[in-house]
Amino acid sequence: MKHNSPNRSTLSHRPRRSQRRSQVRRGPKRVAATLVEFALVCNVLIVTIFTCMEFARMNMARNLAQDAAYFAARTAIVPGATAAEAEAEGERIMSSIFSSGYTVTCSPISDETEEVSVRVAVELDDVAFFLPLFLSGIELESTAKMQTERYSGFYEQ
């Protein structure tokens, strides 16, 4: 006589683990599907990685141009400084990463100059890797304007 307990399931029992493994579909069909999925996703991944690298390089060029303009202007605002010294300082900073592809210009400086303006322009055609293939003629520009430290004098006679 069988005892039917309320805790006993009336469903058929689950197959053993060894039986379940044999039911999993394995073979060349699944490998081919994985290969196709990889081929599709890999292209997108590679394009995304190179795009990130290009944007990081453009950001580096922009930040370097801002720093070069700022430090060149700081060089130019002191009494006795010349525009050539300011441009040399900007070119020194830009040449720390780029060997060409940039221009540094400073407004003319005299003893009466009250404001100095330094402009640094970076041509992306010369410093970018992949962007010139799609867009050409783009220029990043940074300008720093500062008041000079020239003493106009309170005690003029």
Image (cartoon, helix red, strand yellow):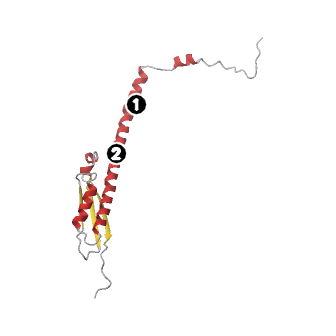
What is the secondary structure assignment of the residue under circle 2? helix
Residue count near mark 1 (Cα–Cα under 10 Å), binned few <14, some 14–19, many ≥20: few
Query: Relative to 109, is 4 on the left or the right?
Result: right
Q: Position of residue 52 (x, y in %)?
A: 36, 45
* Outermost residue to the bottom: 157
Q: Is residue 81 above or below residue 137?
A: below
Residue at left 28%, top 48%? 128
Foreground residue among 68 and 22: 68
Residue 8: % across, % down: 72, 20
Q: Quadrant of the C terminus?
A: bottom left
Residue 80 lies left or right of residue 34; in this view the side is left
Question: Which residue is farthest top?
Answer: 1
Q: Are marks 1 and 2 in contact (CB under 8 Å)?
A: no
Measure the C-alpha gap from mark 1 to mark 2: 24 Å
The mark lying in front, picked from 1 and 2, is 2
Question: Which residue is at 53% across, 19% downward?
Answer: 21
Q: In the image, what residue type sits under mark 1?
A: Glu
Q: Position of residue 140 (x, y in %)?
A: 29, 56
- Above-or-below relation of 129 to 74: above
Location of residue 38 by image quarter: top left
Q: How many marks?
A: 2
Front residue (pair 134, 84): 84
Q: Which residue is mark 1?
A: 37
Identify the secondary structure beneath mark 1.
helix
Give the residue type that dot 2 points to. Met
Question: Considering the image in quadrants, where does the N terminus appear?
Answer: top right
Label 2 CA crowd tier, 10 Å (few <14, some 14–19, many 20+): some
Labelled disc at residue 53 = 2
